[in-house]
Image (cartoon, rainbow, N blue to C red):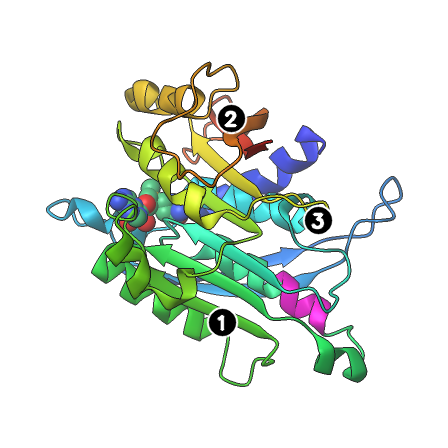
């Protein structure tokens, strides 16, 4: 994906994603439009809007960080719009079911974007195929009650009850720290089956996050078979100077060179989860200062079988 293209569009979007902490509750419209490009005739053309409510960060309530939309979600959403197939959304919707999951969804921008792209594709499906479609699901998860309530509001604002029955977009409680216990998983019906694709934006900022998320992925990311798309976890994080040690945990936890298999891995699993691709993305900082840039890291993580 050309970095300059991404940088230009993400910079515009980032300006919108910034600075909500002091702004009070705000509702914004994100407009995604792709334009026909001579050098990329295969680029899918989309035009849709997403309405998001952001709730201000409550400094006495650390858990409420997810009630705001962070820059990582803006960039990941933009990347998905630019190249949906690279992010697990098939070029043509067929009778094959598709399950998409977002971890730490916050306000839900990434999940809503995925849902809107699938919805746009459904609009071109013939009535005959519509009846034969497999289930298309997007499950946006988070763990904090007020964040989940806001996520639910955002889903309802963007997908009315008249949305095609072929697509299901829902919020679901999922706490990474609790997830490995069997009782926890059995309570969440929408998490019973594994997912084709998992997304995460700005979800690794404490020591244990990468470890917890790996344990979730072992259960929630489908194992590859020759019949399927390659199940993938798409992760983006900002490089915050204050959180360098936490960011480094990603490379350690999803390390290709790990010599010993992790003993906590369920016995039936054949492979290890590793980083397959890593890319640095530079964006203009929201300060409006011309020379100030924020660095993000994008990781594609999958099974090494
Ligand atoms: C910095 S915010 C990013 C939110 C959103 N992905 C975005 O980029 O706008 C981190 C998110 O991770 C969620 N989170 C933190 N710890 C979690 C845990 N143990 N289980 C599930 N979600 C968690 C928070 O509630 C929050 O929504």
The verdict on residue 233 being magenta is no
**Observer able to see residue 142:** yes
For the point 46% across and 40% down, the residue is 72
Distance from Cα at disc 2 to Cα at disc 3: 33 Å
User: Which numbered disc, 2 or 3, marks the residue that appears first in the sequence?
Assistant: 3
**Magenta span covers which residues?**
117-122
- Residue most toward the left? 60
In the rendered view of the protein, which quadrant contains the C terminus?
Answer: top right
- Tell me which corner region of the image, top left, top right, bottom left or bottom right, holds residue 232: top right
Which SS class for mark 1? helix
**Observer able to see residue 15:** no
Q: Which residue is mark 3?
A: 85
Crowding around mark 1 (Cα neighbors within 10 Å: few <14, some 14 to 19, many 20+) is: some
For the point 41% across and 60% down, the residue is 191
Report whether 199 appears left or right of 103: right
Residue 60, position as x, y percentages in the image: 10, 46
Q: Which residue is mark 2?
A: 290
Residue 202, position as x, y percentages in the image: 40, 38
Which SS class for mark 2? loop
Residue 3, position as x, y percentages in the image: 67, 29
Q: Which residue is mark 1?
A: 158
Relative to 164, residue 186 above or below: above
Relative to 133, residue 264 above or below: above
- Residue closest to the eye, 56 or 146: 146
């Amino acid at each position: 994906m050309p970095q300059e293209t991404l940088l230009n569009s993400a910079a515009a979007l980032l300006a919108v994603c910034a600075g909500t902490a002091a702004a009070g509750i705000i509702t914004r419209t994100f407009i995604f439009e792709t334009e026909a490009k001579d050098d990329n005739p295969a680029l899918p053309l989309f035009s849709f809007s997403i309405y998001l409510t952001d709730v201000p960060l409550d400094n006495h309530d650390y858990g409420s960080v997810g009630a705001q939309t962070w820059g990582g979600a803006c960039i990941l959403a933009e990347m998905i719009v630019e190249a949906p197939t690279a992010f697990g959304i098939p070029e043509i919707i067929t009778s094959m079911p598709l399950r998409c999951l977002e971890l730490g969804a916050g306000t839900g921008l990434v999940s809503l974007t995925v849902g809107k792209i699938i919805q746009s594709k459904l609009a071109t499906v013939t009535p005959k195929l519509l009846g034969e479609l497999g289930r298309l699901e997007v499950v946006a998860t988070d763990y904090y009650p007020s964040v989940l309530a806001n996520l639910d509001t955002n889903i309802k604002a963007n997908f009315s009850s008249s949305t095609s029955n072929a697509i299901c977009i829902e919020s679901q409680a999922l706490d990474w720290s609790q997830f490995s216990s069997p009782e926890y998983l059995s309570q969440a019906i929408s998490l019973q089956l594994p997912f084709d694709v998992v997304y995460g934006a700005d979800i690794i900022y404490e020591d244990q996050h990468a470890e917890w998320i790996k344990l979730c992925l072992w259960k929630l990311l489908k194992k590859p078979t020759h019949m399927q798309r390659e199940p993938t976890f798409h992760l983006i994080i900002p490089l915050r100077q204050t959180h360098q040690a936490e960011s480094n945990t990603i490379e350690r936890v999803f390390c290709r060179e790990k010599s010993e298999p992790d003993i906590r891995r369920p016995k039936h699993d054949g492979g290890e989860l590793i980083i397959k691709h890593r890319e640095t993305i530079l964006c203009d900082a929201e300060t409006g200062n011309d020379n100030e840039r924020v660095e993000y890291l994008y990781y594609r993580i999958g099974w090494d079988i």
